[in-house]
Image (cartoon, rainbow, N blue to C red):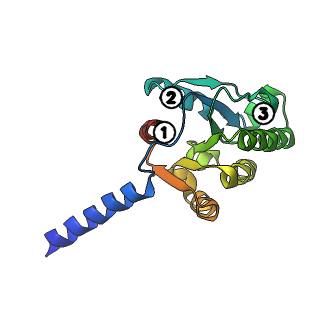
Amino acid sequence: MKRITLVCALLAAVLGSVFAQRTAAFADKPAFVTAIGQSADFEMIKILLTRNKIPFKADTLVKAEDLDGSTRTLILVVGGSSKGLGAAGISAEGEAARTQALLKRAKDLKMTIITVHVGGAARRGAMSDGFITLCMPLSDYAIVVEAGDQDGLFTKLSAQANIALTKVDRISSVGAPLAAAFK
């Protein structure tokens, strides 16, 4: 009886994980990657895209007018960093304004928007949550390291926006669902 219960529990966990993720590729290549909040997590995503042979352009401070339609997918690496914002010479308010303009332009260009948060609980807080709250409602898909959703913010926002949310256990696990998103 214990064996049957264990098998059922494992099967439920696997099926739940599979159904929580998107099942078909939907994003076009190449992608454009930017940092929202200027965290160093941006560099991790660039490495994962390179490893998975996904062509991309990258600019931590891309402006809305720089999106020209040559890329069809926008990847937003969300995570607020006071140090990163300071180094970039931009305030949190300036970053929020850049983000809003970028999201509007991406929607006008009918780009697919993927939000990625890999910083876990350490990259959460009022500043990051503000950026997350800006990005999620206009995203088409989100990938999050589970520790970054301990309070359920991503789960709640993805449900409200009716978008798929994939949670992974660690940063290195982001590569597979990210690669699977691309046609």
Give how far apart the Cα atoms at labels 1 and 3 are: 26 Å
Count the numbered circles shown.
3
The answer to which image quadrant residue 88 occupies is top right
Label 3 vs 2, first from the N-terminus: 2
Label 1 vs 3, first from the N-terminus: 3
Q: Nearer the viewer, residue 133 or 112?
A: 112
Whether residue 51 is situated above or below residue 146 in the rendered picture: above
Identify the disc placed on residue 166: none
Q: Nearer the viewer, residue 7 or 142?
A: 142
Give how far apart the Cα atoms at labels 3 and 2 are: 23 Å
Q: Nearer the viewer, residue 123 or 112?
A: 112
| Marks 1 and 3 in Cβ contact (< 8 Å) | no
What residue is pinned by disc 1?
Answer: 178
Q: Measured from the top left, where is residue 125 in percent x and y?
A: 70, 52
**What secondary structure is found at the residue carrying circle 3?**
helix
Give how far apart the Cα atoms at labels 2 and 1 are: 8 Å
Mark 2 is on which residue type? Leu
Whether residue 134 is situated above or below residue 156 in the rendered picture: above
Q: Nearer the viewer, mark 1 or mark 3?
A: 1
Mark 3 is on which residue type? Leu
What residue is pinned by disc 3?
Answer: 85
Whether residue 28 is situated above or below residue 55 in the rendered picture: below
Q: Residues within 10 Å of mark 2 (few under 14, many from 20)?
A: some
